[in-house]
Image: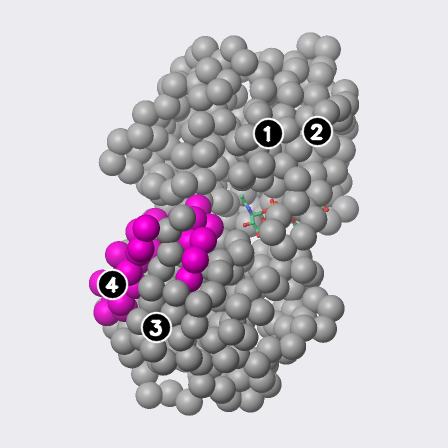
Amino acid sequence: MDSFLVTSKGPLKGAVKISGAKNAVLPVMAAAMLADGVSKIGNAPKLKDMRTMADVLRVTGCRIKESENELSIDASDINHLEAPYELVKTMRASFYVLGPLVAKFGRCRVSLPGGCAWGPRPVDLHLKGLEALGAKINITHGYVEALCNGRLKGNTFSFPISSVGATANILMAATLAEGTSVLQNASIEPEITNLVKYLIGMGANISGIETRTLIVQGVEKLNPGDGSTIADRIEAGTFLAAAAITRGKVKVTDMVPEHQSALLEVFKSMGCEISAGNDWVELDAENKELLPVHITTLPHPGFPTDMQAQLVAVLSTIKGTSSVRDTIYSDRFKHVSELERLGADISLKEDTAIINGGRELTGAQVMASDLRASAALVLAGLAAKGQTKISRIYHLDRGYENFEGKLAELGAHVERIH
Ligand code: UD1
């Protein structure tokens, strides 16, 4: 299992290019299963999660080719309507194959994804939505079996809470259902919009793009897709946080500033100087005395839970009391005890981390527990005096392409040890 050795080298400086978004490419890969023929996905990030999704699709009979930045998925010969436990347990997004498979083939069997390192993550909304479209759902031996007689039937489904994954799954299923589906209180994360655009490119009839009500007129058949993947707003945010925590100045390029409004507001209220262009943002924290802030995570366009851990790390270096409340995943705080090993002073009260910031961080041995927690530990390591060893870095490899290489371009010293 790989580890990172992070050595503090002072403020990060320079420019870094952002890759395609993990959370955008995964549902689009599943969407490719809806057509017969070869779909193309541009700006696909080279990530472990992308390869896990490719393996899930291969099990079903898809043929996948990966070239420099483009994925091609040939879904002409899907013949095994199952996503096995061994793959689904390693990546919850594998569950995205459920909607497309039952919509196209009338049946499938997908392992339940189970919980995450930080707590339970149910799939009840995915299942309720598919039931609303007429699928019969049966859970047996840890697998979800979905069946329908002929095509799914369009219906109105209202999400009781905002769910990115359930929106994607039910939307994909609805594209091939008979009649009209109305998805109310759908998620409006940029990755959902990316999926909607890709599906429309395949011939799906969807209106209400970027709103919380998606109206889908089902079609009998979809064509293979061809589209690009939006920039990863969480990768971009993580590099901005790296600039803030090291009091550096970093220009993050090939990204979409409008996707980051809530995060940029937080950096501004901390006292970071933010400038932005069409596809870049620069964060300048050089020689600045940053200020504590209070953050609450919310569905988009609110502050993203996927940036929560990184911000807890940044705030632990800022004098004064900050707080970070996670309303999406109230237990997502595994990074807190590890940050404490580096000297951070953080207490947890229900869904809120209270950070008594400004204590000196010093290098230590820590363990990554999940994807974004790993990134938070790397950031803290960059600011800590001496050397920090972070084990179980495979969590980080799930969602950051060449993280240590990109950090090195900014002057950081992060060594991977096998
Ligand atoms: C996606 C992202 C993840 C991000 C999360 C929230 C991908 C691959 N992953 O995860 O990085 O942290 O959105 O922005 O895109 N819920 C239910 N029942 C369900 C589904 C969800 O109760 O059937 C709850 C969850 O426990 C959570 C909330 O809904 O409290 C939002 O979760 P959801 O948006 O579904 O997250 P994911 O799609 O799993």
Tell which tag, 3 or 2, sits nearer the viewer: 3
Above or below, comparing residue 289 to residue 154 in the picture: below
Closest to the observer, 244 or 353: 353
Crowd around label 1: few <14 · some 14–19 · many ≥20 (10 Å):
some
The amino acid marked with disc number 3 is Gln
In magenta segment, residue 393? yes
Above or below, comparing residue 334 to residue 395 in the picture: below
**Disc number placed over residue 408 in the picture, else none:** 4
Label 1 element class? helix
Drawn side of residue 41 relative to residue 318, left or right: left
- Please state the extent of the stretch shown in magenta in the rendering: 390-418
Q: Are marks 1 and 4 in contact (CB under 8 Å)?
A: no
In the rendered image, which residue does mark 1 sit on? 85
Tell which tag, 3 or 4, sits nearer the viewer: 3
**Quadrant housing residue 238:** bottom left
In the rendered image, which residue does mark 3 sit on? 387
Q: Earlier in the sequence, mark 3 or mark 2?
A: 2
Q: Earlier in the sequence, mark 1 or mark 4?
A: 1
Give the residue drawn at x 71%, y 43%.
122
Closest to the observer, 206 or 253: 253
Q: CA distance from mark 1 to mark 2?
A: 8 Å
Q: Earlier in the sequence, mark 3 or mark 4?
A: 3
Drawn side of residue 409 relative to residue 283, left or right: left
In the rendered image, which residue does mark 2 sit on? 142
> In the rendered picture of this protein, how many numbered marks are placed on residues?
4
Q: Earlier in the sequence, mark 2 or mark 4?
A: 2
Q: Are marks 1 and 2 in contact (CB under 8 Å)?
A: yes
The residue at label 2 has a CB less than 8 Å from ligand 1: no
